[in-house]
Each structure stands twice: as structure tokens, then as C-alpha cells.
Image: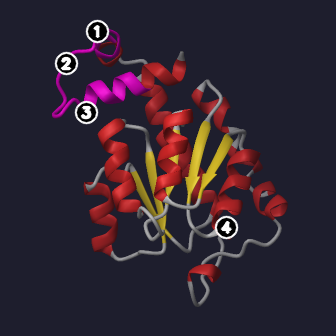
Amino acid sequence: GALFAGADAHDAFDVGDPDLAVADLAGAGRLHDRVDHEVDASVVDDDLEVRTLVRTLLERAGATVREAADGREALRIFFDVRPDLVVLDVEMPELDGWETLERLRDLSEVPVLMLTARDQVEDRVAGLYSGADDYLAKPFALEELLARISAALILVAEALNVPAVLAEARHGHGGGGAGGIQRRAGFLHTITN
């Protein structure tokens, strides 16, 4: 079932027993069953409870997960691992989520899901216009988070079947405003090889 909201960000969801919470998602299947490869994810949040919950959810769904408590650490992980997906908080020390997203977009078109307590329409719109692929405000339901992650990964996997996008990845040319399609295609080509 859905998780309930509390008074502040730490109470934004009921962590409860992650095994029980994730057991409720058995019908969702494993992520790699839906996208045809092992999923490597990065979870970036300064709140250890949130990171633990999201990591547990993703691992139970079959992903390999690396965690970061701030944007600088997230970028180090990104350079080392090149994850298939980044779940990113906004309000963090060192390098916040907006700056981290900007730097990720300079490097890659990796799917980024913003997961944050900033729930105003202006925040969601700013996140999407800044390059996030999706934006989910806390409190959140585990089912919705996993569904949004799965949808983002499926879109990436489906894009692999588009010959023009793959041709761009192989030949390193093409359009897409500032190379967006080329970067996306290169990323897609990389994660499947």
C-alpha cells in the first residue's frame, strides 16, 4: 500500500520493515526482466533512511545500487560506474541536486529521477526543464517509485530498437539540439554492450 506523510522530511514515509514493504511489490517483477540487462543505479540523498529504503527497493527488484550522500560523491560514482539510472535528491550539502543534475547533463543523458521533499509545482517544473526525466515528491509510495524507475528504464531500452538512434551512436554524428540525441544514443549503446 501507499506510504503516509508525516510532519517533516524524515517522516515523509514509513520505512517500516523494508522486506515487508518490498514484498508488496512482488507483482512488479524484477527490473532486468523488463529491460533486458542488469540495472546499475545510483541513489543520491543526504538522508540515510531514504537511501536505505530506495536501495533496498531497487536491490529487491534486481538492481545493483551505489549510494552517495551528496552531489560530489554522486559524480565520482558516475565517472566510475556510469549507472543506468540516477535517483537524485535536491537539498544536499556540498553540491546540491540542481548542480549535480546540471553536471550530469553536461556528461550524459542517463535517466535521472528527482526524489525530493520540494513538492511545489514550480520545483517540479524546474526539475523537468533542468533535464530530469521524472520528478517524484516526498512522501512517496514505493509502488509509484518503482513504476517510475521501471518506466524510465523501459523507455531507454525501447529507444535501443530505433535504428536511427543506434546509427547515431555508432557513427557519432546527428542532430538533437546540443547533441542530446547523440548523447542519449551513445549512452544507450554503452549500457547494452
CA gap, disc 3 to disc 4? 33 Å
CA gap, disc 2 to disc 3? 9 Å
Q: Position of residue 157 (x, y in %)?
A: 49, 27
Secondary structure of residue under mark 3: helix
- The answer to whether residue 148 is magenta is no
Q: Which residues are magenta?
A: 167-187
Q: Position of residue 21 (x, y in %)?
A: 77, 63
- Whether the residues at callouts 1 and 2 have beta carbons within 8 Å, the answer is yes
Residue under label 4: 48
Query: Which residue type does callout 1 highlight?
Result: His
Q: Is residue 23 above or below residue 28?
A: below
Q: Position of residue 109 (x, y in %)?
A: 36, 37
Secondary structure of residue under mark 2: loop
Residue under label 2: 174
Query: Which residue type does callout 4 highlight?
Result: Leu
Q: Is residue 13 above or below residue 115?
A: below
Q: Earlier in the sequence, mark 3 or mark 4?
A: 4
Residue under label 3: 180
Indicate how the structure is coloured in the image: secondary structure
Q: Earlier in the sequence, mark 3 or mark 1?
A: 1
For mark 2, does the 10 Å Cα neighbourhood hold few (<14), some (14 to 19), or many (20 or more) residues? some
Q: Which residue is drawn at the image coordinates 65% and 61% (left, top)?
A: 51
- The answer to whether residue 181 is magenta is yes
Is 129 in front, or is 104? 104
- Whether the residues at callouts 3 and 4 have beta carbons within 8 Å, the answer is no
Q: Which residue is drawn at the image coordinates 47% and 21% (left, top)?
A: 190
Secondary structure of residue under mark 4: helix
